[in-house]
Amino acid sequence: MKLDAGIPAGPLHDKWDRHRFEMKLVNPSNKRKYHVIVVGSGLAGASAAATLSELGYQVSCFCFQDSPRRAHSIAAQGGINAAKNYQNDGDSIRRLFYDTIKGGDFRAREANVYRLAQISVQIIDQCVAQGVPFAREYGGLLSNRSFGGAQVSRTFYARGQTGQQLLLGAYQALEKEVARGGVRMFPRTEMLDLVVVDGHARGIVARDLVTGSVSAHTGHAVVMATGGYGNAFYLSTNAKGSNATAIWRAYRRGAAFANPCFTQIHPTCIPQSGHYQSKLTLMSESLRNDGRVWVPKGAGDQRAPHDIPEGERDYYLERKYPSFGNLSPRDIASRAAKEVCDEGRGVGPGGRGVYLDFADAIRRLGEDTIRERYGNLFEMYERITAEDPYHAPMRIYPAVHYTMGGLWVDYNLMSTIPGLHVLGEANFSDHGANRLGASALMQGLADGYFVIPATIGHYLATNTLPPVNESHAEVVDATRLVEERIRRLLGIRGKRTVQSFHRELGTLMWNECGMARNASGLRKALERLPALRHEFWENVTVPGSGSELNQSLEHAGRVGDFLELAELICLDALQREESCGGHFRTEHQTPDGEARRDDDRFAYVAAWEYGGASAPPILHREPLVFENVQLSTRSYK
Amino acid sequence: MNAPGGLHFTLRVWRQAGPDETGRFETYSATDVSPDMSFLEMLDVVNEGLTERGESPVAFDHDCREGICGTCGIMINGVAHGPMRATTTCQLHMRSFADGQTITIEPWRARAFPVVRDLCVDRGALDRIVQAGGFISVSTGSARDANATPIAKADVEASMDAAACIGCGACVAACPNGSASLFTGAKITHLGYLPQGQPERARRALSMVAQMDLEHFGGCTLFGECQEACPKGISIDVISRMNRDYWTAMLFHGEESSGNYTG
């Protein structure tokens, strides 16, 4: 396998522009002859499907949810970054680029990130034109807030529902194209395999979740925008249905998987309340604009927060990172929370929590201002915990939130399988080892609205793609394999529920490959995983049949894939003998507990190639070349 | 005996194997329920028990479990999304129920929402209403600078109040007529408060309302049950705006109108 990122030549600020000129175009009247399959309808998928259809391509779009509007992008709360510099506070495309590269702990590609920062500006324009009701000032102009890892105010937002509003914008554009006949939508349909013909991605095998029928859909190119794999940890802030099956099946068909161990643990989530817990709920990072994070100075302090005097509180983020304080990046804030809880200073049941306190902000700004800024988040917190955050501090704890790793893509967002393009969280490309807040929405929309519409034309114009229909041997074979796997899952009739396997997998991953990792824990996980997988395929019970709506069967297929992916995550974490971003190896830290990167040995993208059912995966390295930024130790002190 | 703090409930759950099958209520026990469990977590535990006993688990739609995706939605004791105001089913917690209570759980009941299985219904009609005109026709790349048109804060706030709709369908389920007017009115209001939404305003109202009728939703007779059931607290005022846009378009503009009027 050869990794060629295809980064255009020339100065950084010129690369994208020059590349767009150099790429081949598809004649407008020829576009309708091409059929593009888009899997996923979140920010990246819906924006791509809508835009490709506007350009004239025939598009089929698939999602497992009952409507494309439900994709998990909808849950993003805080905002979307853009280098508009409307605040005149020193922002620029170069600064957004630099913040993102540094925030990712120098493990992302310069050229991709610079392009992202350039496009960020157009995204806001596009969304406003679609009717996204971003927050505004009294003068009628757009308002901004600050997010972690930045010292400028560049985050656009729509209350605490920014993801929802951006997704509705993309969804409405998609439905506009459905109505026009450019997009055919397949809701409640799940991709279960990729069809590769003569080395090119030519379609997918999908299951209609209502009738259970399995069928192939073929086209000229496949675009996967299927989100992240945080649910490998069972408990995460992801939606229950979020899964890795599409990217995992593509990996098994030859797409390299890059940096699987780069997972983001978000510092501000509502702590777990019991063993029955089905998911963890995020409290937007934007809360750290006004909330102060603290724990008692003394271990085992059981007093109520109000009874702890100011002098006995440790505002540990402000103490350790005075220049960024409560707005330190996610990985740093999460590790700091774990550290104080490990010291016995955590609060709430089980001692796995820290306070996020708004008392000062309410005193300074008044309860009404706080209500206007965060009202819906405060309500959500109260609904879940039955505690009123206007009067008692929130309790928060880190939880798995986002995966920076994903399928390897080149500058054109194409994977190592020609014709398979990967967008949004499903790819690895822009966030390095840690994503900054409000950058996921930016990346999803950049990929879908602006990058893929430009690059897919070049692929289609420069490749000869003979017709492939449903009776082609590769298509028939892929369909048969999917059907066999379903039959096998249904035929085990063992004793353990899918849920119990998923929960055990999650506990193992959280303990051994979570916020802090080390070689012995990872080896332990790598020993346990094959056994757990073996037990799954011997002893899982999946009730019902394959020819009906069967949610246990859907879950079983996804857990089967998570069980394989988990092993790759651990392998990757084990080989990366450094600490960077969200990947913290306890063996590699400075005396004061900060991450110690090793640029000489690990300034590369780890791209894993599937080795087959009985052989280990093969590691390929794409060196990261930094020509425009100085590699420095990331400091927020 | 229940563990300390454990609650017990009797559940009457609607079971229906498919759209054309006959449905019926089945009774299950939910024991040792923590008051901090969400309603759906309680159902998860019941389902795990059913699976372990070799019975078929109850199918219900859910995804984000944080009240924003709009996937979940069931009738709980005859109330859409259950007893807590402005709360989706996934955000409802068992502390809202009395120990020992019998809880009746049904799918949304509406002619336009056929049952898919158990508690899952087909809400595709809502997508088709959006297809009829719930958008602003702007192709990618043709936008001008985001700050080129100032928009009064009050207008954006009113637009956002309506845009908060999650498309769950509770309004339809709660309406004695099975009307989708709150849903449709919310989209018309979201876009109608913004300058960008003006060129298509008349056309949007005409086609979305027409589609609503085609999908067999009932008419609105202003019962107001929809706003009581709405988990996002969307006000029935959006229906007045929809009606005004619709009648203005019918009376003064017709199908060909640019809808270029203020309001």
Image: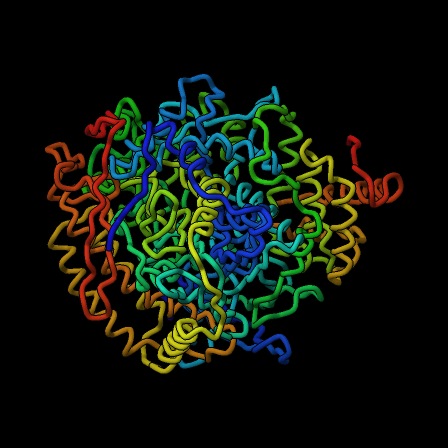
Residue A497, quarter of the rendered image: bottom left
Q: Give above or below for B125 relative to A75.
A: below
Residue B3: quadrant of the picture: bottom left
Instruction: Name the residue located 72 percent from the left edge and 43 percent from the top edge.
Output: B238
Q: Is residue A209 left or right of residue A101?
A: right
Quarter of the view holding residue B1: bottom left
Where residue A518 sits in the image (x, y, percent)? 14, 49
Counting from the top left corner in percent of width and height, residue B41 is at 44, 61
Q: Nearer the viewer, residue A201 or A336?
A: A201
Left or right placement of residue B248 versus residue A149 in this view: right
Query: Quick one: quadrant of the C terminus of chain A?
Result: top left
Is there any visible trace of residue B191 in the rendered image? yes
Position of B50 compared to B10: left or right?
A: left
Q: Where is residue A368 drawn, in percent x and y?
A: 54, 28
Where is residue A220 drawn, in percent x and y?
Answer: 47, 59
From what the image shows, is residue A389 above or below residue A241? above
- The image's colour scheme reads rainbow
- Image quarter where the N terminus of chain A lies is bottom left
**Where A108 falls versus A99 (above or below)?**
below
Residue drawn at x 66%, y 34% as measured from the top left: B158
Nearer to the camera, B100 or A50: A50
| Depth check, front residue: A111 or A236 | A111
Q: Residue at x 40, y 26 (%)?
A: A93
In this rendering, position of residue A350 left or right of residue B194: left
